[in-house]
Image: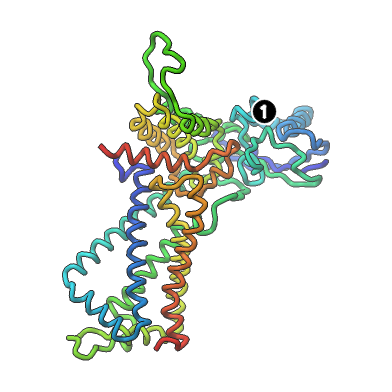
């Protein structure tokens, strides 16, 4: 099938960017979205033009590297699907597709569709871990964890840190990402010890990175390729209130 | 970090002040609906409030403070949120959020303007001198029933009130469920229910408040 692509092109972090139009004339419905872009890039390289820069890694929907706003929705809006797992069979011959990078102050564009998501790393560095003493390895099942808590933590841990939550948020808030890690660790005995310090440190870092404030649009959950639930944001709010109490 | 600077701290302040404002408008609505019980009922209600003297003024000052905090933090948070997305995508498609949630600051500011008009109209009583008639034996008190029923003979005033309450519906329909999420009182089962309850609360407030000017101008209440 034939498609018309409108792609955000930006030479560097401080260069002005604009939408440019490309024709993709030999698109197979079996291709993934990234494979389709690979082919467009092959043509651009043959023509001596600058290929479209975009982030990708595992291409099996688990690494969180691919990050494109497709037709106005991060990852293209298919339920629980990353860009790499979005296939061209979801489009029709003759479709026009808008491809843009994440847009948030905390995610500066590096080039074209690639953005710097170091802000999410800094939020994790601020508190998204559990401290432990070095030394002998403790027994695997020395600390018993109930199935409910284990399942809850696992659901939160599904987050791949792709940035779609902040990219989809009208306020560019990183609250879903932050809350997933806060909730995951707060519900486990190993993480609960540092829960108070963690929630404050991670929230302060998110603010320092330039993310906005959560106003409960719930857009993040809808855009999340892993279906992270906004109940974790409610949990983060509870953890914040608990941390305020003596 | 202070609660007044924290992202979630200010969200909780918005929810606490919002809860107080919702509580106030519910009580205020119940009081206002006494107009349907006739002149004696609403005037007795007004006199009862007046007889409380300083308590009324303390209550008014507290509500003014709550209102001011809600507005100031609301504007501050909105400015920060706009600044967090300096460049927007060319194409933006929202999957979940809606008009009410996206226009909270607009509906909030319209409500502020409405409250100012409402206070001038029925509390300070300067907009329509002809409707402020002293009540018999009321020591200079205005006949509230006459004020309301005469005030709502004017189509312009009725329109302003109904439109104002339309914005109240928008604001509350997002704000009410948002409050529960902010307190951490919602989960994946309760949230979808609360989203609908929130709209219902908005509809009840809209219907309750708008019924007063509408039933009066239609001549059903006189």
Residue corresponding to mark 1: A60
- Residue B45 figure quarter: bottom left
Look at 83% across and 36% down and name the residue there.
Answer: A26
Q: Position of residue A137 (x, y in %)?
A: 43, 11
In this view, the residue farthest toward the bottom is B136
Query: Is B72 drawn above or below residue A77 in the view shown?
Result: below
Near mark 1 (Cα within 10 A), the count class, few <14, some 14-19 or many ≥20, is few
Position of the C terminus of chain A, as image quadrant, is top left
Look at 43% across and 45% down and name the residue there.
Answer: A213
- Residue B110 figure quarter: bottom left
Look at 45% across and 57% down and name the residue there.
Answer: B104
Query: Is B92 drawn above or below residue A37 in the view shown?
Result: below
Q: Position of residue B30 (x, y in %)?
A: 35, 72
Look at 48% across and 67% down and name the residue there.
Answer: B203
- Asked if residue A246 lies left or right of residue B19, the reply is left
Q: Position of residue A159 (x, y in %)?
A: 54, 32
> How many callouts does the rendering have?
1
- Asked if residue B172 lies left or right of residue A30, the reply is left
Scheme by which the image is coloured: rainbow
- Asked if residue B187 lies left or right of residue A200, the reply is right
- Residue B32 figure quarter: bottom left
Q: Position of residue B163 (x, y in %)?
A: 47, 72
């Amino acid at each position: 099938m034939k498609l018309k692509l409108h792609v955000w092109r930006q030479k560097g972090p401080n260069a002005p960017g604009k939408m440019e139009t490309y024709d993709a004339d030999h698109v197979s419905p079996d291709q993934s979205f990234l494979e389709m872009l690979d082919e467009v890039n092959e043509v651009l390289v043959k023509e001596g033009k600058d290929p479209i820069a975009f982030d990708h890694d595992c291409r099996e929907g688990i690494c969180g590297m691919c990050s494109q706003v497709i037709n106005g929705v991060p990852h293209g809006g298919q339920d629980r699907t990353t860009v790499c797992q979005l296939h061209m069979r979801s489009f029709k011959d003759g479709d026009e597709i808008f491809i843009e990078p994440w847009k948030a102050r905390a995610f500066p564009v590096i080039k074209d569709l690639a953005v710097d998501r170091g802000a999410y790393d800094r939020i994790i560095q601020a508190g998204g871990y559990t401290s432990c003493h070095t030394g002998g390895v403790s027994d695997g099942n020395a600390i018993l964890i109930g199935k409910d808590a284990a399942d809850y933590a696992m659901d939160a841990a599904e987050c791949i840190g792709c940035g779609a939550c902040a990219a989809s948020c009208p306020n560019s808030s990183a609250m879903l990402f932050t809350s997933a890690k806060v909730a995951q660790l707060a519900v486990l005995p190993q993480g609960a010890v540092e829960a108070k310090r963690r929630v404050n440190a991670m929230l302060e870092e998110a603010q320092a990175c330039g993310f906005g404030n959560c106003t409960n649009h719930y857009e993040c959950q809808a855009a999340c390729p892993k279906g992270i639930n906004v109940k974790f944001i409610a949990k983060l709010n509870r953890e914040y209130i608990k941390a305020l109490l003596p | 970090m202070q609660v007044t600077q924290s992202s979630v701290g200010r969200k909780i302040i918005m929810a606490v002040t919002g809860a107080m404002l919702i509580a106030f408008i519910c009580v205020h609505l119940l009081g206002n609906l006494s107009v349907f019980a006739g002149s004696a009922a609403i005037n007795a209600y007004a006199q009862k409030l007046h007889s409380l003297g300083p308590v009324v003024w303390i209550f008014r000052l507290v509500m003014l403070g709550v209102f001011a905090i809600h507005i100031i933090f609301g504007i501050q948070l909105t400015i920060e949120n706009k600044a967090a997305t300096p460049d927007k995508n060319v194409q933006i498609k929202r999957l979940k959020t809606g008009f009410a949630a996206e226009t909270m600051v607009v509906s909030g500011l319209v409500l502020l303007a409405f409250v100012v008009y409402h206070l001038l109209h029925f509390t300070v009583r300067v907009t329509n001198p002809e409707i402020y008639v002293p009540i018999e034996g009321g020591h200079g008190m205005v006949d509230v029933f006459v004020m309301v029923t005469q005030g709502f003979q004017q189509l312009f005033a009725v329109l302003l009130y109904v439109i104002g309450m339309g914005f109240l519906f928008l604001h509350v329909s997002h704000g009410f469920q948002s409050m529960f999420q902010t307190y951490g009182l919602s989960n994946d089962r309760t949230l979808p229910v609360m989203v609908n309850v929130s709209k219902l609360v908005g509809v009840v407030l809209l219907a309750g408040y708008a019924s007063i000017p509408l039933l009066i101008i239609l001549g059903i209440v006189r």
